[in-house]
Amino acid sequence: MEIRNKKAYYNYFILKEIEAGIELVGTEIKSIRKGSANIKDSYIRIKDNEVFLINTYIEKYEQGNNFNHNPTRERKLLLHKKEIKKLYEEVKTEGVTLIPLKIYLKNNHAKVLIGVAKGKKLYDKRESIKKRDIERENR
């Protein structure tokens, strides 16, 4: 199962992509396998040399009873120290941010594809709409 952030490619120029693991509790992985998650309004923050996925909605698992999780809690991302330092240096640049592009399963582990992104201006968004329309007409 793959959960995509389609708005990310519309709102941002993706400069670089990095794969990271997610620290999850038991019922969260079951909800992700079912496809019950949303990363549309999510972002990634670095604090105290750790990387966190914030505002990601992972639905409560219906058979989870009292072991269920908070749907929008902060989730730690698993990266090496060198990768975290490199991301921090890139984010210090003005206008650059970290956003999740997709959550997917790889060898039974949940992974996040992190995008180092720079925000698009309104005229850039209009241009990408034009390109998409031209490609659609050429098919």
Image (cartoon, rainbow, N blue to C red):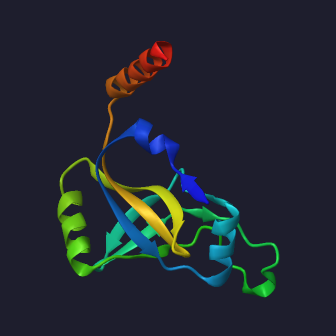
Residue 116, by quadrant, is bottom left
Name the residue nearer the viewer: 44 or 6: 6
**Label tally:** 0
Residue farthest to the bottom?
A: 67
Q: At 20% across and 72% down in the image, what residue appears?
A: 85
Q: At 18% across and 53% down in the image, what residue appears?
A: 93
- 49 to 93, vertically: above or below: below
14 sits to left or right of 41? left
Name the quarter where the N terminus is drawn: bottom right
Q: At 68% across and 61% down in the image, what residue appears?
A: 36
30 sits to left or right of 114? right
Residue 103: horizontal and vertical position, in percent?
51, 61
Residue 29, by quadrant, is bottom right
Residue 80: horizontal and vertical position, in percent?
28, 79
Residue 113: horizontal and vertical position, in percent?
41, 60
Residue 82: horizontal and vertical position, in percent?
20, 76
- 21 to 138, vertically: above or below: below
Name the residue nearer the viewer: 18 or 125: 18
